[in-house]
Amino acid sequence: MADTTTTDTKLKRHPVRGFLYGIFFGLGLALVVIGQSWAALGTWPPFIVLIVGIIVGTLWATFGPAKAPKGPPPAGATLADEPAPESEPDFEPAPVGAEPEAAAEEPIEDLAPPPTEDEAPGF
């Protein structure tokens, strides 16, 4: 039998993102509670609803169903433990202390002469 190895795909969880989404969920739910007059604005229930939203969002991001990876990694992908292969630069660097190449100076003939005092707008 041939010994084949496959890379295991690990699902990535995002509890911090769930915390942030939970804040928005809790704020929205608290606004519904206040808007429906189920609780007054200056009381504890809207704050408790916000905390419950944060907890629900964090738990959902940590333990809820995760999406499967969309496909296998690209053929040229490397693992984080392996160093990236060395590549040659696309240009030849200039030696240290060399003068930079001067741009070709072309006379600019399309510019109009500066306005005289008679033509200048007054401010």
Image (cartoon, rainbow, N blue to C red):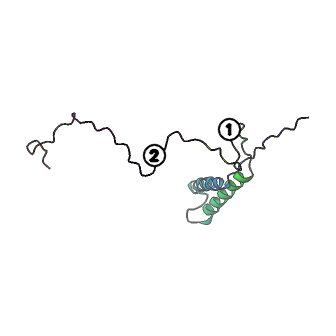
> Which quarter of the figure has residue 112?
top left
Q: Which residues are magenta?
A: 87-110
3D distance between C-alphas at marks 1 and 2? 31 Å
Q: Quadrant of the image for the N terminus?
A: top right
Residue 20 lies, in percent from the top left, at 61, 55
Residue 91 lies, in percent from the top left, at 50, 40
Outermost residue toward the bottom in this view: 43
For the residue marked with disc 2, what is the amino acid?
A: Ala
**The disc label shown at residue 94, or none:** 2
Q: Is residue 39 inside the magenta stretch? A: no
Could you tell me which residue is drawn at 13 percent across and 45 percent down? 121
Could you tell me which residue is drawn at 13 percent across and 42 percent down? 115
Tally the numbered discs. Answer: 2
Q: In terms of secondary structure, what is the magenta stretch mainly? A: loop
Closer to us: 75 or 108: 108
Outermost residue toward the left in this view: 118
